[in-house]
Amino acid sequence: MRSITIILCLSLVGCSTLKDSTMLGIGIGSLLGTAAGVAAGTPKGNEMKAGAIGAVLGGAIGGVTGAAQFKSQSPKVIKLKPDAQEHEASNPVMSMPKVRRVWVPDRIEGNKFIRGHFIYVIERDASWRMNGGE
């Protein structure tokens, strides 16, 4: 009776992960299945075989029950959708900067050879603007 009380108390303890809940269910189910199998026995009196069968069946049922219990207690994520029109009208946007790309050809400066390359010049910085306006 004392062991059944301990097992029932353990079954009421919440677990933090699906794996923990499933493993706890398998453990408790195996213990209860073994006890039930040994107590019931078989028609030929083979308690060991009955205990093993009870452990397997109890573990399977306990694992499924533990997983189901975890899923039923998992917090549900509720996504709140803001009113898109209200926020869209008031959110500012950023304009793209105006950038000019300039090719600088190969050149020689004194004893240095400088390979041709691009330079990028910002002609107008990015700026904030309201939707619908420039």
Image (cartoon, grey):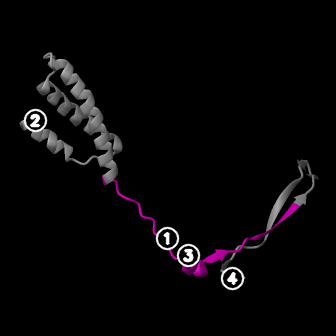
Q: Which image quarter: residue 46?
A: top left
Q: Earlier in the sequence, mark 2 or mark 3?
A: 2
In this rendering, the answer to whether 57 lies above or below 79 is above
Of the pair 116 and 18, the residue shown nearer to us: 18
* Residue 21 visible within the image: no
Label disc, if present, on residue 66 of the rendered structure: none
Q: How far across and down, in percent of the image, does residue 12 sit?
A: 19, 47
The label nearer to you, 2 versus 4, is 2
Is residue 85 part of the magenta span, yes or no? yes
Residue labelled with disc 1: 81
Q: Are marks 1 and 3 in contact (CB under 8 Å)?
A: yes
Residue 127 placement, left or right of 108: left
Q: Residue at x 33, y 45 (%)?
A: 17
Q: Quadrant of the image for the C terminus?
A: bottom right
Residue labelled with disc 4: 132
Label disc, if present, on residue 3 of the rendered structure: 2
